[in-house]
Amino acid sequence: MANIVGATRTSSLDVDVFRLADDKMRRDTFADGYVDSPSPRMVALPSQDDIRLLRIPSETSTLRRLSQDSDGVPMVLERQKAFKVAQECKLMQPLTRTPGEHGPLSLERHVDTIPNCLGCSVPGDEKQEGPAFNYARVFTWWNMANRLHQAFEKTAANLESRLDVDGKMVPEDLKFKECNLKGDSLHLLRYCGLADTINGQIVPQDLKEYPEWSELDSGFYQRIVTAIAVGLFVQWCTTGAAIVISYLTEVRGLGCRSGGYILYGILGVLSFVFLFASSIFSHAAMLRHEAMQRDRHLKEKERGASCFEYPPPPPPRSPAAFRGLAVVTRMLGRVLVVTNAAWLILSSIWELVGFYDNCWCDGTVLSKGWRGWVILFKESSAMAAAARQPWAGGVFLSVFGLAGSCSVFWLYCRGNRM
């Protein structure tokens, strides 16, 4: 992989005609805590292993000479290709950077500031990628989605009021789309409702990762209750159909098959309870950890301590009770998930190989005890007629669960579009 090794001034012939542009002051997002210094125009000079950035002048006469020189075109194309490769590899970082006025805002400047307990990370599944771990991001996802929604609403209101980024009204006789709505990061933050004007200065709002309990509105809890209800409804409609068929088929009663399905449903609910409780305990622990980190950052700023001190001082600890409960409940939930999946596979294999075809299972001894009995002399047609009603009830329960879940999703999607 190519490396950017330095920047030097070049002669007037080293000009990239495709990348010449006026010097501009560019600013990063406020969350980065830095603003880019005015950087000169650069050209990428490729070599065998490195890419050397060269500073170029902007004389128009040089442009004319290079454009008329046919030998310079391949060289320019090679440099342009090298520049694109470096950009795609995300190697083109600003050469000089100066700390912004507010300093870096990242609360996790070092990996060891993330709290852990019993050798496991407290956030746990929240930091993992993939939809399987979305349950652990229920609080942070809502917080981010809510802030984005508020920013879009504020922007839409400003556009409807015909306001530019400076807060000035655009006259009706001018086309609003022709108005310049560009600005630096602070003005755009204020335009989107993410910054306030205090004493004539634009001060960005605090963007916290973990919302306070008081910030969670009633709609948040309503969505959680609805999601839990729909999940339990779908699970027990499918699992319940299998339980009904196995329980009501002769010999009726709680036996090996119906008992195995009930055990599968109970383990599934318990695993959900433990994992959901883990997300609550993790949020409580990380909420206090975030507050401690913010206080620590403010104290360091008051003392004038360097934000890049290395090695960093030991981070403050959040309450051990929440950290321990978050890790323990998450581990129990994972163990139950794996155990439940293994039990379902094992039960299916036993059904296929005929492990349940014995007197103890066929006689439903699990529920009848010593009064259990088995079918010895019965024609297949008679047994099929007796099993018709249980199978019809199981199929109806499955279809009802499918239709009910689809109706809920359709109603929610319809409500979001409206």
Image: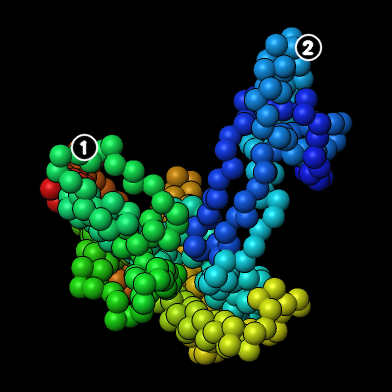
- Give left or right: position of 248 versus 207: left
CA neighbours of label 2 inside 10 A, class few (<14), some (14 to 19), many (20+): few
Q: Residue at x 45, y 57 (%)?
A: 185
Viewer-closest of 156 and 270: 156
Residue 133 image position (x, y, % from top left): 46, 59
Residue 336, above or below 286:
above
Q: Which residue is mark 1?
A: 175
The residue type indicated by label 2 comes to: Asp
> Residue 71, labelled with which disc?
2
Residue located farthest toward the right when viewing the structure as drawn: 48
Q: Quadrant of the N terminus?
A: top right
Q: How is the protein colored in the picture?
A: rainbow
Name the N-terminal-most of marks 2 and 1.
Answer: 2
Q: Secondary structure at mark 1?
A: loop
- The residue located at (58%, 34%) in the rendering is 21
Nearer-the-camera pick, 343 or 19: 19
